Image (cartoon, helix red, strand yellow):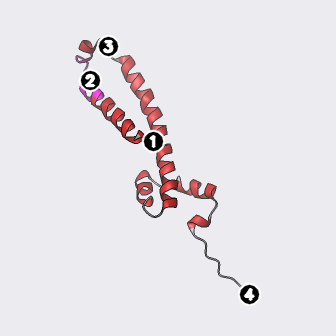
Amino acid sequence: MTTTNISLSFTDLPLLVQEKIIKYFSYTELSRLRSISKHFHRLCSEELNRGYLQLETIIHDLQKQIKIKLPRRESERHKVEKFDLLNKICIFLNLASFINKI
């Protein structure tokens, strides 16, 4: 009886299996893995973008909820406690969204 030594690498796995495995990595780990190769860059970037789009939807919904609770007039909004912080968060999120689309 002969035995063969088979060595498989991660990229030899079916793409669907690779994508499922990649989902278990943190975003920090995914960003580091992208530098390994073009294949890893594409694979990890897709997962990072998917996570960002999900987060963007959640943030958009939260922004709507916050704006509903604020007064309609801009002059009245400044009287609301923590308005400046909420405003800075909204600006930051809009900037992050803009940068991601470049």
Out of 36 and 4, give the one closest to the viewer. Answer: 36
Identity, as a three-letter code, of the amino acid under mark 3: Pro
Q: In terms of secondary structure, where does tag 2 sit?
A: helix
Q: Which mark is residue 71?
A: 3
Q: In terms of secondary structure, where does tag 3 sit?
A: loop
Report how far apart the C-alphas of labels 2 and 4 lie in the structure: 74 Å
Q: Residue furthest bottom?
A: 1
Give the residue drawn at x 63%, y 55%: 16
Identity, as a three-letter code, of the amino acid under mark 4: Thr
Report how far apart the C-alphas of labels 3 and 1 lie in the structure: 30 Å
Identity, as a three-letter code, of the amino acid under mark 2: Phe
Q: Earlier in the sequence, mark 4 or mark 1?
A: 4
Give the residue drawn at x 61%, y 72%: 8
Residue 54 at x, y percent in the picture: 49, 38
Q: Which mark is residue 52?
A: 1
| Magenta-tinted stretch | 77-87
Reading the image, the residue beneath label 4 is 2
Reading the image, the residue beneath label 2 is 83
